[in-house]
Amino acid sequence: MSKLGFKTEAAEPSKNIAKERLQFILIQDRIKLSPGEMDLLKKELLDVLAKYINVDEKNIRMDIDRHDGMMALVANFPIKRSG
Amino acid sequence: MAGKVIVITSGKGGVGKTTTTANIGTALALMDKRVCLIDADIGLRNLDVVMGLENRIVYDIVDVVEGNCRLEQALIRDKRNSSLFLLPAAQTRDKTAVTPYQMQELTESLKEEMDYVLVDSPAGIEQGFKNAISGAERAIIVTTPEVSAIRDADRIIGLLETEGLKNPEVIINRIRQNMVDKGDMMGIDDMIEILAINLLGVVPEDENIVISTNRGEPIVLKADKSRAGLAFQNIARRIDGEELPLMSLERDTLINKLKRIVGLS
């Protein structure tokens, strides 16, 4: 696992960095949350979920989707495999 | 005849709004459509230069709304296409010289005579932008594959929807496929995923654009010799309702994915 982690880190194409930064910026722009508030929201959501399920904290993803003039906050909390 | 009024906008400056407006307009005129281009960038007039019509300006948009001349007197007929017209911006006034209501009236009377009225919007989200979109029923957003331009495009999409211009479409300009292949530029799929919007077309970076702007001749006039010209021609055909696949800048799987998103298959 550490081997994989190292590999992706070293070969990270700059467009992925652009994409990640953009996704974060757009969330802030779209729902007008500061990075601090966003972190807090993520943390509070995680606290609630962690009470019931084993969340893979490293791979949480939050996104704003927009369809036909409606926006939705889509949060992705992957579940850790037990054992 | 009741033509369509389409605003071409971007948020960020320098992404190619004016070049796009000139080329789509010229391409539509080459398809025998009656087209009027409106330069709504008052104070920073440029569409006339890109079209090579700067020496023919007598009256401008502000003269029309202030009643110094009739609308027909201010329209400049294109050198190459008798069905293409330009209503130039004023250079010595500012964005408040035309109101949204006046712009609406202007586009209303123009679309009686035209198949398409294309409004070249100024950069920014202030009064000039609001004026430019006020008569439009359809919006095209031009962006480049850069973080700053996409961020601004996203903001514009939100503003357009608030103003009732639903389902705006995007043109991705100045894509460099070699950089996309190397992973150093966001590709079409990345941008669609991020913006969640319909893609109207993709225009590759092309040195011929600089040459054509130097000459004041839109590149679609030489669409057979340039990829950007061909891309603009395809965009014009899509605007006119033709179902046309995207140019092969990208791989097959991607094309298919996009076709689905754009609704071509």
Image: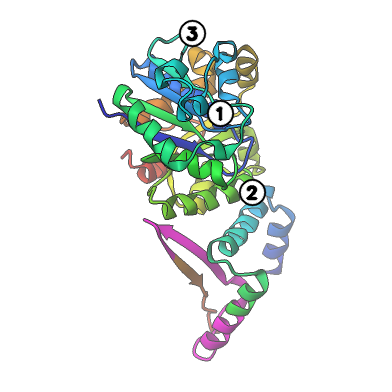
In the image, is residue A16 above or below residue B128?
Answer: below
Viewer-proximal residue, B67 or B50? B67
Amino acid type indicated by mark 1: Thr
- Disc ID at residue B147: 2
Magenta-highlighted residues: A42-71
Residue A35 position, x and y percent, is 66, 69
What residue is pinned by disc 3?
B79
Residue B207 position, x and y percent, is 64, 21
| B82 on left or right of B175 | left
Viewer-proximal residue, B20 or A54? B20
Q: Residues within 10 Å of mark 1 (few under 14, many from 20)?
A: many
What residue is pinned by disc 1?
B18
Amino acid type indicated by mark 2: Val
Q: Chain of mark 3?
A: B
Viewer-proximal residue, B76 or B242? B76
Circle nearer the N terminus (2, 3): 3
Query: What secondary structure is found at the residue carrying circle 2?
Result: helix
Whether the residues at callouts 2 and 3 have beta carbons within 8 Å, the answer is no
Quadrant housing the C terminus of chain B: top left
Quadrant housing the N terminus of chain B: top left
Q: Chain of mark 1?
A: B
| A6 on left or right of B4 | right
Circle nearer the N terminus (1, 3): 1
Residue at image coords 39%, 47%: B165
Say which of marks 2 and 3 sits in front. Answer: 3
Residue at image coords 40%, 35%: B6
